[in-house]
Amino acid sequence: MDPVYRGGYPFVPYRSPHLSPQEARARAEAVRSRLDARRSVRDFSAEPVPRELIASAIQAASTAPSGAHKQPWTFVAVSDPSIKAQIRRAAEEEERRSYDERMSPEWIEAIAPLGTDWRKPYLETAPWLVVLFAQRWGIGPGGERIKHYYVQESCGIAAGLFICALHESGLSTLTHTPSPMGFLSKILGRPDNERPMILFPIGHAAEDALVPDIERKPLEQVSVWLEGG
Ligand code: IYR
């Protein structure tokens, strides 16, 4: 179908699928329940995962809305064992300093129920590591800087869709944010316009994987409703 023009730019028709009330309710409940079954995983199986699954999840993430549609993200996918080993070594070095010196007692106490420490074996066990880099600005065809908008928000939404897509394909992940994470730019050879934002180990949960026995806030605690009219 030919586009129509608005302000000189092409527009195409979009029809959102209008479901019956019953179908809409059933789907809403199904997606709620599937997402509720997701857990952050730190015990991974070494079982390989085909690159196509990772590629599809990156494409799903990349459907995220973004400021001025600049799509200011780069996903770096690593399955090379020697690069994973380098990342683990560097991450553990930083984490050891964080746990020993940088994190406040209050912070240590807040994450105590998660059972974490400086050791990050999953950075080598998980078959894939994907690092989401936020592009602070873009680079045009002639090398010129392209301004990006709402970079953190856009990348945060892309990260959420990525996690959802992985979960839907039966994979587990963790939003790991070793701090500081400049080492990721160096090891992965990323340019200066990109900042590492989240490191996702990805794979199947180990058969004996355990997750913290924690609960999600109920609807009443996470929402306010102003209805009527
Ligand atoms: N980055 C550290 C510490 C950590 C911080 C938060 I906030 C968490 O929710 C969990 C862990 C680590 O990965 O161990």
Image (cartoon, helix red, strand yellow):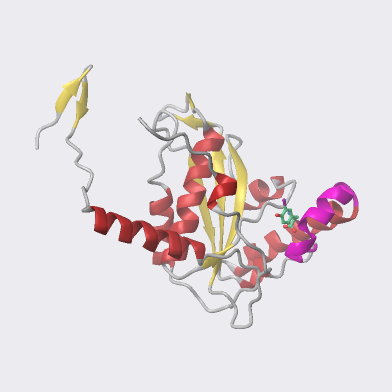
Question: Residue 30 occupies which quadrant of the picture?
Answer: bottom left
| Residue at the farthest bottom position | 207
Considering only vertical position in the picture, is 65 above or below 33?
above
Q: Nearer the viewer, residue 167 or 179?
A: 167
| Residue at the farthest top position | 7
The count of marks equals 0
Residue 177, position as x, y percentages in the image: 67, 51
Q: Residue at x 61, y 56 (%)?
A: 175
Q: Would residue 60 be found to the left or right of residue 162 on screen?
A: left
Residue 66, position as x, y percentages in the image: 43, 35
Classified by dominant secondary structure, the portion drawn in magenta counts as helix
Residue 129, position as x, y percentages in the image: 57, 61
Q: Residue at x 40, y 38 (%)?
A: 65
Taking the image as four quarters, which one is ligand 1 found in? bottom right
Q: Which residues are magenta?
A: 101-117
Give the quarter of the figure containing the N terminus: top left
Considering only vertical position in the picture, is 19 above or below 194?
below
Q: Would residue 209 be found to the left or right of residue 158 on screen?
A: right
Residue 108 on the magenta segment: yes
Considering only vertical position in the picture, is 205 above or below 85?
below
